[in-house]
Image (cartoon, rainbow, N blue to C red):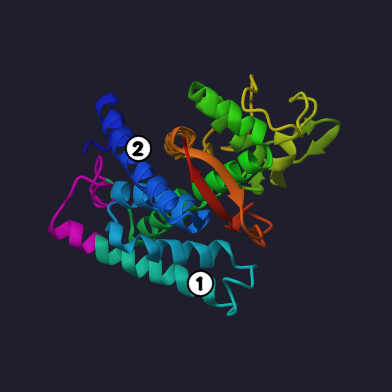
Amino acid sequence: MNRGFTPKAMRMLESHFRDVAVSLIDEALETGEIDFVDKVSAELPLIAIAELVGIPVEDRRKVFDWSNTMIGSTDPDFNQDPNAPMIASMELYAYSNELALQRKAEPKDDIITTLISEHDGDVLSEHEFDLFMLLLAVAGNETTRNGISHGTLAMIEHPDQWAKLKADTSLVTSAVEEILRWGTPVNNFARTAVCDVELHGITIKEGETVSMLYPSANRDEAVFSNPDTFDITRNPNPHVTFGGGGPHFCLGANLARLEMRILFEEMAKRVDSIELTGEVRKLRSSFIHGIKTLPVRLRPAK
């Protein structure tokens, strides 16, 4: 499959990911009561990023465990050992380097092969490759997983919006944008000012660190009318969930949107109702706005 994301490649990706989504939803419907995070939200992004990067799909749960350990470093459910995040990152690096050795011997049409290849005389160092793999493996599944989970919870808590989406699946694109605004999977990022600037009467000096609070921006009453209302028809919706633009804009924004659009479109077609069956448990983190467990019962469309 062409990793350049030509129109043909995008159609192939969408068709394949749709098949995966349908399989996950149908299995959840057959089971009845599930942890939606574990069985659906996590699975589609894990399978997608594994296939694109070149990680064997059967190893996707290793990536799931490593990313949970690293992102959940302040959550006691994931980390009893303060050294666990570092150990997880080292295990991911070792695993990635083993895959790199395999691709050097047998190149494939995947991102790993691209990363280890020479481009215009340049090649990534081992450390650069390790960091890139960590970024792809963690960011490629964690944030989309939580976006899907928050969107599903929002539909449960706002049944009128779920009914609206089921009645008109063409709303799925605006619904995904509202889910991204509403859920905002990443709480904050730090940036360094490259020059002096005045913002709302506050002077920020060159070299100072600025913390950007994405949930605050996504509920800014100066930008959004009724910001505390979940509205899948909201337009315009200039949320900053993927960043505000520039060189730090999320590399996987379009992939995340594609996965979420496919999943919620197929759910709207195949699922009649989504009911909570237990406690929703949130991730203890100042960085990631995550959902650890979302116990639900799915009922099939009539």
Find the residue positioned furthest to the bottom: 81
**How far apart, in angstroms, are the residues tagged by discs 1 and 2?**
35 Å
Q: Identify the residue at horizontal 72%, vertical 35% (top origin).
A: 217
Q: Which residue is mark 2?
A: 18
Seen from the viewer's position, the closer of residues 282 and 266 is 266
The x and y percentages for residue 153 are 62, 46
Q: State whether residue 110 is above or below residue 235.
A: below
Could you say whether the residue bearing mark 1 is in a helix, strand or loop? helix
Q: Using the image as rendered, state which of residue 187 and residue 226 is in the foreground.
A: 226
Q: Which region is colored magenta? A: 100-121
Q: Is residue 98 found left or right of 180 in the rendered image?
A: left
Q: Residue at x 77, y 34 (%)?
A: 228
- The percent coordinates of residue 279 (x first, y second) are 66, 60
Q: Is residue 234 above or below residue 88?
A: above
| Residue 298, placed above or below residue 194 | below
> Considering the numbered disc 2 on the image, is that residue within a helix, a strand or a loop?
helix
Q: Quadrant of residue 94?
A: bottom left
**Is the residue marked by circle 2 packed among few (<14), some (14-19), or many (20+) residues within 10 Å?**
many
- Is 115 included in the stretch rendered in magenta? yes
Find residue 237 and report its horizontal and vertical position in percent.
Answer: 64, 24
Instruction: Looking at the image, tell me whether mark 1 or mark 2 is earlier in sequence order.
Output: 2
Q: Which residue is mark 1?
A: 86
> Which amino acid, by three-letter code, is at mark 2?
Arg
Q: Say if residue 174 shows up in the picture.
A: yes
Residue farthest toward the right in the current orientation of the protein:
201
Is 234 or 87 nearer to us in this picture? 234
Residue drawn at x 48%, y 50% is 41
Instruction: Classify residue 246 by image quadrant.
Output: top right
Q: Name the spot of residue 118 as percent of width and height, x first.
A: 23, 47
In the foreground, 132 or 180: 180
As drawn, the residue found furthest toward the left would be 106
Report the number of discs.
Answer: 2
